[in-house]
Image: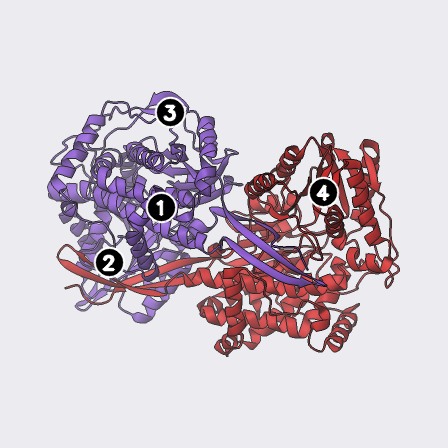
Chain colours: A red, B purple
């Protein structure tokens, strides 16, 4: 049965292996919802499944149920979803996870890969639009982003993790015959090398982008033989609850213990995160969330392994452009995308005080700032367009942050763009805000010198291009940075910037204009997080993300009596 | 020049790659000193080089010299070696290491591998017997072990680390072209993937077996572009000082900054270990040494990566043997080897209370214990043989430990074998002891429930075979275990034991008798340390040992204007 699953998915898996080697553009999934097979029916079913779940208990036959909990509020309606999930006794989850592991670890690599590919395939074929609705009404993403970024792109990241897990495991031969002369005798040993999973993994999923990191983390742990306890943010449970239920169903159908994947829940008032990280039976922690808690995880997870992806003070260096309007349009789009609630959203935009060089001459800093703000405003003026690109604010705290920063900015510098709620055409009660943009100087670093989560960006005046690069890469080193964006024409400066950002560890996009969001990260091609700065210690996906999730135990015994 | 070095060593390197894939027996080096090219001359030169160094300053042209330090005492003469080494200012070592890295990181993979293969080759061709003398007169190993275990086998472990580093780096394509349609436009990006070293690595070397772990650790860090500060134990500096000097010479000759490899020294009274581990510029820590400090390192190294190999409470389960005398001889040999001052030496020998099954009937526990003690005694009765196998005690503290354990053992159980100094035929003042063997019950676990470093072992009476296996694997899980040894004939029991030790994470040797030391670990074939228990978190050598020592930074830019 399980090996049949591998055969079913072999062609896609081998194609994914090739893509990871060559890093070209590929996906087995259509990225436009409209191209999904029988799209309208599927979308309707997905919406119906979500609607049917509202106000109901989410049935999950996992061990140790204690009580029903659920605090989710849709950013689109600002109403409680009313879904209640079984909160399980943590010890029973660990007991069940540990009991489930041996048979799973003993199954071969191909068997595990086959089952996990099947789980991703079932999510894609049967639950993708339900997941998309769940992501919309918890994380607050637009439908298109929920389908693509939290749907097919996240499935791609999952397959990618399987590719690297397989590569790391295949590097270990399962057996060997070893023969050597010792003094008068020949010793011939048969050696067996076993891949031993680390133990129980705890996978944290964040509130604003739950699946994109959690799926590859789950798959990296499961592929290497571990069990996974999924701990979603209490604001965004449903996407991961659907995920857990699918994995459990597929595991059971393949003859494995469904308790390899379980759900651990907490509430805002009674969090269990630290308890899980420091639980003596936790062997692996995958964490996506705030810089602060991520660093706590890295520091306190021992002896568990910790893989973190937090957030970044992502920077832009804007010194010259062949087509300044095109550059500003691209920046504006990226600043607006999901109201900058992505770990890859730019925040700090460094511009030389003298302005930006263009073929038509140098455009002064103030004009650049004004035109960038105008570009953002024009993207958000039409509520229908605003809804597509800005979507909603995941957390009400973001509104308070915007107000605070706006007031600070007005005192210290200039408010380039005032944030305001926009009226979502479909959801009149949606929690929305257009972006806040501030113009500041480098003396205001206390204001922009950390990730300000939400639709806020800073245009920061610098001495010159080199100062802009220095300031920007310092932010990356000190506060973390995942992405970086450069507009420049001097090739020597570009080369310096590539080198400086490479050392600081932010993935750099140079002089990109056009229809692609600047911060788009393609599975199988773009590495996400370098591990070189406080934005996280793990990269999606390289060998280091998977290779330590299993260990190698060997046994050896004489093949025959020595002669 | 550097690429020539890769070509020079390509055939050996490719052969090593094959060995790592297939895990058969191979080495480019002769394991017997007598088979070394022109062995007698080389041995004489090595001894002369060592003798010429005694009482002298060890010249090392590295930055920041503060004063001359040196506390080494030869376990063979119990006289100070009188060698003084330049103690460097730590900040200057970090400054120099950081300055040296960029050009090294920019050099290609093959260039770095070529230079590092050359360094190993220079150690082999020009310094091997000098290193062997240095190991003898610091760690206290026998000449044969110093040549093999601390010489050629350690070089093999170094090459092995290069093989895995190369494999992990090759998994990242240096560039890709990526093309996709976004709405109306085709986006075509050229992407560049850079391997970025983590930073400055600190490599701790231990007192009793300095090179075997330190060489592969250094090479893993250097191959992936990092600089290495080597911090030897103050009792055993010379082998690593020679190593550092060779690496510096080879790096300089190849056109690189020699400060990629430097030596940091401390004294027993004024240790710098914790300072180095927690230094803000330390990016990687490799540690070999005590369990206690190893666990401190794992817990406190953050944000540096920590790779540890400490020590083990290594266990034997002895339930049945086709040839009990052969099994006891093998055990006795392994208990004596370098006075059990190896992290792979067995310590806790679990025997069912009813005795050991043999073809001639069950041999009672007391008789098994007596015969094992007699086998140890017969190996150590002749001083010449004792010198070959026991060598010396590295530390005077070991004598105090033996006395303490002997007295405790006499009160609680039975002293099977009293330790005594033996007269070394060449070095009458050598610090020596024959092994202490105690017979105890499982109620005495406080006595044997940790690694007791030195020539001491415990025969422990158990309820039955299953109890023996439970006790032994519990030791591994709780106190750490690198190796394990099983003598049994029931195949179902053997299978259970293989599974139990695999989960506990000790490398198991089953029913081995004959001329091979039971704890012999072969480079390219035997994995050393699993990472599953307190004996360490790193394995020599798997992908996890190398893959996180570098990160991947990318940049991407349009290949041409979008259409």
Left or right of B219, for residue A481: right
Q: Which mark is residue B87?
A: 3
Circle 1 SS class = helix
Instruction: Please state the chain letter of the residue tagged with numbered disc 4 in the rendered image.
Output: A
Instruction: Please state the chain letter of the residue tagged with numbered disc 1 in the rendered image.
Output: B
Q: Which mark is residue A359?
A: 4
Instruction: Tell us which disc is closer to us: 1 or 3.
Output: 1
Q: Position of residue B150 (x, y in %)?
A: 26, 43
Q: Which residue is mark 2?
A: B365
Relative depth, front residue between B168 and B427: B168
Relative depth, front residue between B539 and A413: A413
Task: Estimate how packed mark 2 is, as few (under 14), some (14 to 19) or many (20 or more) residues with alpha carbons within 10 Å.
Answer: many
Q: Which residue is mark 1?
A: B3
Q: Position of residue A307 (x, y in %)?
A: 56, 51
Label 4 with label 1: CB-CB less than 8 Å: no
Instruction: Tell us which disc is closer to us: 2 or 3.
Output: 3
- Using the rendered view, name the quadrant where residue A356 is placed: top right
Instruction: Tell us which disc is closer to us: 4 or 1.
Output: 4
Instruction: Please state the chain letter of the residue tagged with numbered disc 3 in the rendered image.
Output: B
Circle 2 SS class = helix
Relative depth, front residue between A73 and A311: A311
User: What separation in Å lies between label 3 and label 4 (alpha carbons)?
Assistant: 58 Å
Same chain, labels 4 and 1: no
């Amino acid at each position: 049965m399980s090996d049949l699953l591998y055969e079913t998915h072999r062609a896609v898996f081998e194609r994914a292996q090739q893509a990871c080697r060559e890093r070209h553009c590929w996906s087995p999934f259509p990225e436009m919802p409209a191209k999904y097979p029988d799209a309208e029916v599927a979308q309707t079913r997905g919406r119906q499944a979500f609607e049917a779940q509202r106000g109901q208990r989410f049935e999950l036959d996992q061990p140790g149920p204690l009580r029903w909990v659920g605090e989710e509020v849709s950013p689109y309606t600002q109403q409680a979803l009313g879904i209640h999930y079984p909160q399980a006794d943590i010890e029973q989850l660990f007991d069940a996870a540990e009991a489930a592991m041996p048979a799973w670890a003993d199954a071969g690599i191909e068997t595990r890969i086959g089952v996990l590919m099947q789980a991703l395939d079932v999510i894609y074929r049967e639950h993708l639009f339900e997941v998309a609705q769940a992501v919309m009404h918890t994380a607050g993403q637009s439908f298109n982003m929920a389908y693509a970024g939290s749907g097919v792109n996240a499935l791609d990241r999952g397959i990618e993790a399987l590719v690297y897990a397989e590569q790391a495991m295949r590097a270990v031969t399962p057996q060997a015959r070893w023969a050597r002369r010792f003094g008068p005798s020949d010793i011939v040993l048969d050696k067996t090398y076993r891949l031993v999973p680390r133990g129980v993994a705890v996978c944290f999923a964040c509130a604003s982008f739950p699946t994109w990191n959690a799926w590859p983390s789950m798959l990296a742990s499961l592929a290497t033989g571990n069990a996974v306890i999924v701990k979603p943010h209490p604001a965004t449970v449903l996407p991961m609850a659907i995920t857990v239920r699918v994995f459990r169903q597929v595991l059971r159908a393949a003859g494995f213990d469904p308790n390899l994947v379980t759900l651990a829940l907490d509430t805002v008032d009674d969090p269990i995160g630290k308890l899980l990280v420091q639980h003596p039976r936790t062997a692996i922690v995958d964490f996506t969330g705030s810089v602060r808690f991520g660093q706590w995880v890295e520091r306190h997870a021992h002896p568990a392994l910790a893989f973190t992806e937090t957030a970044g003070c992502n920077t832009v260096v804007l010194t010259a452009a062949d087509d300044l309007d095109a550059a500003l349009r691209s920046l504006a789009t990226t600043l607006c995308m999901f109201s900058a609630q992505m770990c890859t959203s730019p925040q700090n935009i460094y511009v030389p005080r003298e302005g930006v060089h263009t073929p038509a001459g140098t455009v002064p800093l103030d004009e650049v700032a004004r035109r960038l703000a105008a570009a953002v405003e024009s993207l958000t003026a039409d509520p229908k367009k605003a809804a597509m690109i800005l979507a909603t604010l995941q957390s009400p705290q973001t509104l308070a942050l915007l107000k605070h920063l706006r007031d600070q900015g007005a005192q210290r510098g200039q408010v380039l763009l005032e944030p305001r709620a926009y009226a979502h055409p479909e959801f009149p009660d949606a929690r929305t805000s257009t972006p806040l943009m501030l113009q500041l100087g480098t003396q205001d670093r206390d204001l922009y010198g950390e990730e300000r989560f939400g639709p806020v960006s800073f245009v920061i005046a610098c001495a010159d291009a080199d100062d802009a690069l220095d300031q920007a890469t310092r932010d990356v080193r000190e506060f973390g940075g995942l992405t970086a964006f450069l507009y420049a024409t001097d090739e020597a400066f570009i080369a310096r910037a590539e080198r400086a950002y490479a050392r600081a560890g932010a993935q750099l996009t140079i002089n990109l204009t056009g229809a692609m969001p600047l911060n788009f990260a393609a599975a199988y091609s773009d590495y996400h997080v370098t591990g070189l700065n406080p934005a996280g210690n793990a990269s999606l996906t390289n060998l280091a993300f998977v290779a330590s999730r299993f260990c190698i135990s060997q046994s050896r015994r004489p093949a025959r009596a020595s002669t």
